[in-house]
Image (cartoon, helix red, strand yellow):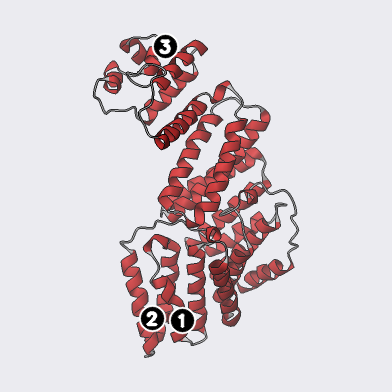
Amino acid sequence: MALKTALNLNLATFAEHLGLSPSTVNHWSAPGSSVTPGREAQELLTVALNQATGEAKNRFWATVAAGPGEPVGAPERLDLGGQIRDGATLSMTMADEAAQLASSDEQLSYLRDELCRIAVAYVHTPLSTVVDDLRDAQKTLAAITQTAHRPRSAHEATLLSGVLCLLLAHASQNAGDQKAALQQLRSASTFANVADSDALRAWTLGSAALMLEWSSRPGEAATRAREGLQYPVSAQSHQRLLAIAARSAARAGDTPAARDALARLGDLDPAPAARDDVVHFGGLLSFPATKLTYYQGGALTLLGDYERAEHHSSTAINGYETGPLEDRSYDDEALARLDVTRARLGQGDVAGALAAAEPVLTLDPQLRIRQIDTAIGGLRADAHALAGRRHGDAAELTDRLTGYLTAARQAPRALPSASA
C-alpha cells in the first residue's frame, strides 16, 4: 500500500498504527485481491495520512501518482478523455486529503458552485444522479469541516453544510424516507443557528412545513411556515413561506388563515428585505413567479374557489411549458394539472376534469413523484363519490385514477420534487 510504504512501516506495524488486525490490512494489499478498505477503514487511513510528516506525504503522493507497478513519469495508456477524467479525479482526491495543509477557501468556493449547479438541475435530473452528486459534495465538505478553519472559512463551511442538508432533505422525502428527511432538516436547523443565518433558518422552516403538509399534518405545517416569517429575508423567501402557509391552512380547513396568507402575498413588497444566503443558490432553493402562481392555485382549489383556482393553475402550467427547459419543474406542472382537474370537478365539468388529468395519467414514470400519488388518491375519492351518483364520465375518471395508483405501487420514483 502507498501509505504503508510512505510511512516506512512493515505490515504488522502499519496495522497496529491504524488499530486494525494485520490480516485485515493484508487483504487490501494481497496480489490479485479485490478487497478494498470499508468506510471506517478509509477514515482511519485519512487520519493517518493527515498526521503524517510532510516528507511522508510527499512519498505517498509520488507513489499514488506513479500507480501500481509503474515508475514515476511512465506514460499513461489511456485515451485523451480517460486521462482528463482520471487527472481530475486524482486532483480532487489530493485536494481533499490536503485540506488541512492550506486554506480551504478554494474548496469551499468550488462546493458553493457545485451546490448551485445541483440546486438548479434538481427539478429535471433523476433522483439517483442528484443523490450521487450530493453525497460527493457531502464527503468533500465533511473532510473540510474536520480541519481547522479561519473564522471566515468556518462560517462558509457551516452555511454550505446547511444548504447541503436542505437539498438532501428534499431528496430523502422524494425517495420516501421520511425519517432521513427529518434528520436532514434537524441538521440544517443546527447549521443555521451555528452560522447565525436567518435565511437558512427561514428556508429550513419552510421545508419542514412542506414535509408536514404532505405527511397529513397541514395544521402544524401552516404554523411552522408562519414561524419563518419572523426573519428578515428576501421577498422570494417570504413569498414561499406565505404560499406554504396559505395552502397548508386551506388543506387543514382553516379558511380565515388561508385567505389571510393569500392576501398578504398580494400586499408583499417585492423588494428584498435583507441578504438571503439561500435564494442565491437558485433552482430548488428559489421561488420564481410560476411556482408562486402554482401554490396560489393549489390553495384556492382547497378553499373551493374553483374558478380562480383553475385560472391560477392553468397560468402556472403555461409558465412551465413555455419557460426555459432547465427551469421546467415537471412535478409542479403535474400537480398543477391535478389542481385543474379538482377545480373542474368542483364546477361539475367531469369531462374537462378527465382531459386535465390525462397528461398526468400518461406521464413518463421517470417524471413521477410520490406527491402525485397522494393528490391522485384524493381525486379518486372525489370522482368515486360522483360515480356513485351514476355519472358516466366520473366512473371512467375513477377507473383511470385507480389504474394509475395500481401501477404506481410498483413503479420507481426517479425524479426529485421541486415542490416537495
In the visual, does 215 lie left or right of 1?
Answer: right
Which element type, helix, strand or loop, lies under badge 2?
helix
Q: Residue furthest bottom?
A: 390
Measured along the vertical axis of the image, is residue 234 above or below residue 108? below
Counting residues from the start of the chain, the first of labels 2 and 1 encountered is 1
Q: Please give the residue where the numbered disc 1 appears in the rendered image.
A: 353
Residue drawn at x 66%, y 56% as measured from the top left: 237
- Local crowd size for mark 3, using a 10 Å CA cut-off: few (<14), some (14–19), many (≥20): some
Q: Please give the residue where the numbered disc 2 appears in the rendered image.
A: 397
Classify residue 412 by image quadrant.
Answer: bottom left
Measured along the vertical axis of the image, is residue 188 above or below residue 152? below
Label 1 is placed on what type of residue?
A: Ala
Which element type, helix, strand or loop, lies under badge 3?
loop
Residue drawn at x 35%, y 77% as measured from the top left: 400
Label 2 is placed on what type of residue?
A: Leu
Count of labels in the image: 3
Q: Please give the residue where the numbered disc 3 appears in the rendered image.
A: 7
